[in-house]
């Protein structure tokens, strides 16, 4: 349930703009001092659309997270204490295909990581009464086999730890270890033992049948140099890359970087605090030299919903980019997943999902916000299929109500299958922006557009490697050398399909010269 603050590449045929030089020669004789191109008029790019929808008040009750593997999405049935498999092979008709056996360790399950054919599920505490926050369920890591019979997950190992794993909320798996963020007590919740949880836990999962804790860092007893930093104050998520773990600590508005090169002896190397760009940060995903952070604190059009952190030097991590929440489309940003040039965010307060173009991480750009209370009420989980379908989960319908804290009664959880690219990717160069086929002008300013909103652009001049364009819809060149030039723009969609458009022209710095052989217009005189 939402955490409460207090309260195959497909190359399409390029469109070639070459217009035979001979045929264009006369038109190019017009004297040009300054070229200015009118704004291109394009149809609005197609936005993502719903393909299919599944609702279930037993097997999807209170679903908080979803992870995709092959043709199945695996979801946490929070109230039922099961891991549910949803067949997504037909995007228009996602269907529950099976579920694991019920287990107390799977009650209150919050997040899923799939690695090596296994699903690793973490769970948090359940309130036993108004004075107790632990009824003996949850606070666990449960490992399930999802490769032998994908439609029916089977439990292979369980680790229950009501101290270190109290409030288990985030998980990442790498190299035989699971790294878990356990958030501890929530504000306003009964909290007999405040030191439980608020921890970063390393679990050896090399044998999935016997997961074993090998190291723990707790906020109440941080190592020398970090005492009082609140580096692990309400940790909610963890991402792992190149020997480092990145942990969001929501109550401290911080991203904590931990050296895990020796998993049994994790070391904090950086606590990045930023109450503006990391406002109640709850989830993090890493790709390349950047960490992408979702801020649940986003509550207005100007609030930051997604922050980009440069982690090229982990011990000097710093915020370098951010996206606010226009029209509230990122309000309550809750989970984030990154693939290729895009980050996808579930926005629980907005009742929707959003997509951000991160092809230029320093200048991230919101490309869509899909809000739908009927399908995405309090949306929490999301993941991306290999074919580029966005799978999103909602814990209960807008017609239902739920208490602020667990336990929750049976609720109708949902799974939505969203087509990010409803049309085959295509890109068009605006003819009005194309230079004349032969011109003395050594500059060019192209305008272009893709037919899908989820499309990133790369520009190419004269066969050079593709690079970021000047803007997502335009490219400018200056000081072009004389001779023939070819400009190409590549559009890539969510599934990695690529479309290309090209235009070739001639820069003649000395002006247009008539190179045709002379003709005799009259008979010679003798």
Image (cartoon, rainbow, N blue to C red):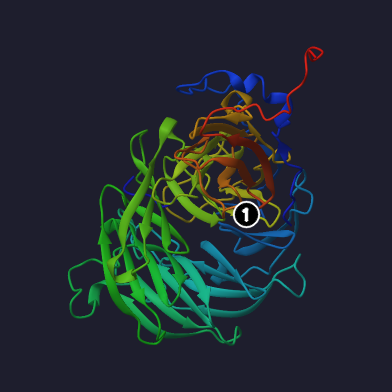
Above or below 280: residue 104 = below
The x, y position of residue 148, in whole percent, is 76, 75
The x, y position of residue 496, in whole percent, is 66, 52
Front-most of 273 and 373?
273
Front-most of 23 and 355?
23
In the image, taking residue 210 as reference, residue 223 lies left or right, namely left
Q: Residue at x 48, y 49 (%)?
A: 358
Front-most of 471 and 79?
471
Name the residue furthest front.
526
Q: Residue at x 31, y 55 (%)?
A: 319
Q: Residues within 10 Å of mark 1 (few under 14, many from 20)?
A: many
The x, y position of residue 403, in whole percent, is 45, 47
In the image, taking residue 235 as reference, residue 203 lies left or right, namely right
Above or below 9: residue 123 = below
Q: Secondary structure at mark 1?
A: strand
| Residue on which disc 1 sits | 384
In the image, taking residue 294 as reference, residue 92 lies left or right, namely right
Front-most of 476 and 428?
476
- The count of marks equals 1
- Whether residue 198 appears in this view of the structure is no
- Whether residue 300 appears in this view of the structure is yes
Q: Residue at x 75, y 47 (%)?
A: 91
Above or below 137: residue 295 = above
The x, y position of residue 227, in whole percent, is 18, 73
Pick the quarter of the image with the C terminus: top right
Asked which quadrant contains residue 156, the reply is bottom right
Q: Residue at x 60, y 75 (%)?
A: 143
């Amino acid at each position: 349930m939402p955490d409460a603050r207090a309260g195959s590449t497909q190359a399409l045929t390029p469109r070639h703009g070459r217009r035979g030089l001979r045929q264009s020669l006369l038109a190019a004789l017009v004297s040009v001092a300054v070229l200015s191109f009118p704004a291109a008029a394009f149809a609005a790019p197609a936005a993502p659309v719903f393909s299919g929808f599944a609702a279930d008040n037993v097997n999807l009750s209170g679903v908080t997270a979803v992870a995709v593997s092959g043709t199945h999405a695996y979801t946490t049935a929070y109230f039922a204490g099961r891991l549910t498999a949803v067949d997504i092979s037909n995007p228009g008709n996602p269907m529950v295909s099976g579920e694991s056996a019920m287990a107390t360790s799977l009650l209150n399950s919050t997040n899923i990581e799939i690695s090596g054919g296994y699903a690793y599920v973490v769970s948090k505490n359940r309130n036993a009464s108004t004075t107790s926050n632990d009824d003996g369920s949850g606070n666990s890591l449960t490992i399930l086999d999802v490769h032998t019979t994908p439609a029916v997950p089977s439990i292979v190992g369980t680790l229950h730890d009501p101290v270190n794993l109290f409030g288990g909320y985030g998980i990442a798996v790498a190299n035989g270890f699971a790294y878990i963020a356990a958030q501890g007590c929530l504000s306003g919740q009964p909290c007999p033992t405040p030191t439980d949880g608020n921890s970063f836990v390393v679990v050896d999962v090399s044998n999935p049948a016997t997961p074993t804790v090998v190291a723990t860092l707790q906020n109440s007893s941080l190592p020398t140099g970090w005492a009082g930093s609140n580096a692990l104050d309400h940790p909610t998520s963890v991402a792992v890359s190149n020997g480092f773990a990145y942990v969001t600590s929501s109550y401290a508005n911080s991203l904590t970087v931990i050296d895990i090169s020796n998993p049994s002896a994790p070391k904090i190397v950086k606590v990045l605090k930023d109450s503006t760009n990391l406002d109640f940060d709850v989830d993090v995903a890493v790709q390349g030299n950047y960490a992408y952070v979702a801020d649940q604190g986003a509550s207005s059009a100007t609030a930051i919903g997604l922050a980009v952190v440069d982690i090229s030097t982990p011990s000097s991590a710093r915020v370098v980019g951010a996206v606010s929440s226009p029209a509230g489309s990122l309000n309550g940003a809750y989970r984030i997943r990154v693939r290729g040039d895009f980050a996808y965010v579930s926005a629980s307060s907005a009742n929707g999902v959003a997509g951000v173009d991160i092809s230029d991480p320093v200048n991230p750009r919101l490309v869509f916000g899909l809000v739908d209370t009927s399908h995405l009420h309090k949306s929490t989980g999301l993941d991306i299929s290999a074919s580029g379908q966005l799978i999103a989960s909602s814990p209960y319908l807008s017609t239902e109500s739920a208490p602020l804290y667990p336990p929750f009664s049976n609720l109708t959880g949902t799974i939505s299958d969203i087509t990010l690219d409803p049309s085959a990717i295509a890109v068009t160069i605006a003819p009005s922006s194309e230079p004349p086929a032969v011109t003395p002008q050594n500059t060019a300013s192209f305008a272009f557009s893709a037919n899908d909103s989820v499309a990133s652009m790369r520009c190419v001049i004269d066969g050079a490697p593709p690079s970021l364009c000047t803007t997502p819809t335009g490219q400018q060149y200056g000081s072009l050398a004389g001779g023939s030039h070819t400009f190409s723009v590549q559009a890539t969609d969510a599934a990695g399909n690529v479309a290309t458009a090209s235009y070739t022209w001639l820069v003649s710095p000395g002006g247009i010269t008539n190179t045709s052989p002379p003709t005799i217009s009259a008979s010679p005189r003798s």
